[in-house]
Amino acid sequence: MAGAVPAKRPLEIFAHMITRMRFSHSVRNGYALVFGLFLGLCILKFGNAIILDRQILAPSNVAEAWRYGWPLHWAFWVLVLLGLAGLGVAGVAGCRRLSPAWLMAPPLIWFGWQCLSSLRTVDTALTSITLWHFGGCVACFFAGACLLGSRRACGWICSK
C-alpha cells in the first residue's frame, strides 16, 4: 500500500513508554525536590506564629534577610506558584490517587468548616491570614497525596 504509515514494532512502543515514564518520574522528582526545599525554607524563615504576621517586618537588606524571619504572606505567594507548577506536573506526570478515597475528605471538610466559621469573626485581618495559612496546609496535603504520595508510602495509613 502506497502512503500507508508503517506500524510501530512492539519494541519501539515499549521504548517510548519507558522514556515517557522516566521523563514523568524525573519531573515528579524535580517537583518533590523543589517542594521539599520550600518546606525547609518555611521552617527556617516562616516559622513565626501566624498571629505575629503584622509585627514581622520585611528585611531591608541581605544581612537582615539572612538573620531574621520573613513575613508569612511571602510564603503564601510562593505556595501559589508551587501549586500552579504542581498542576503542570500533574498534567505531565499524572496524578497518583491515594486510596482509600475517604482519606481525602477530612481536610476539605475541616477547611470548609473553618471558612464557614470565619463568617462570624471578631478580627477580620487575623481570620484572613489564618485562612490563607489553613488553605496552604490543605494545599500541601493534596500536593503530597496526589503528586508525591504512593500507596507504598502510606502503608501505615491504609491497608493493602
Image (cartoon, grey):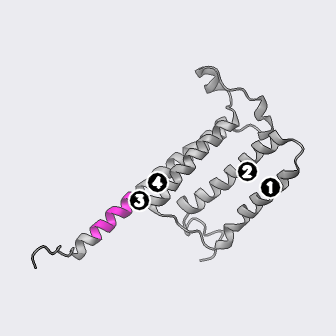
Res. 114 mark: 1
Q: Residue under circle 4?
A: 29
Q: CA distance from mark 2 to mark 4?
A: 26 Å
Amino acid type assigned to the residue bearing label 1 in the image: Gln
Amino acid type assigned to the residue bearing label 2 in the image: Phe
Q: Secondary structure at mark 3?
A: helix
Q: Secondary structure at mark 1?
A: helix
- Magenta region: which residues? 14-23
Asked whether the residues under the numbered discs 3 and 4 touch, taking CB atoms below 8 Å apart as contact, a structural biologist would say: no
Q: Please tell me whether the stretch drawn in magenta is mainly helix, strand or loop.
A: helix
Q: Residue under circle 2?
A: 134
Where residue 125 sits: x, y (%)?
80, 39
Name the side, left or right, on which 159 lies relative to 114: left
Q: Residue under circle 3?
A: 24
Q: Residues within 10 Å of mark 4 (few under 14, many from 20)?
A: some
Q: CA distance from mark 2 to mark 1?
A: 8 Å
Q: CA distance from mark 2 to mark 3?
A: 30 Å
Magenta span includes 16: yes
Q: Secondary structure at mark 2?
A: helix
Amino acid type assigned to the residue bearing label 4 in the image: Asn
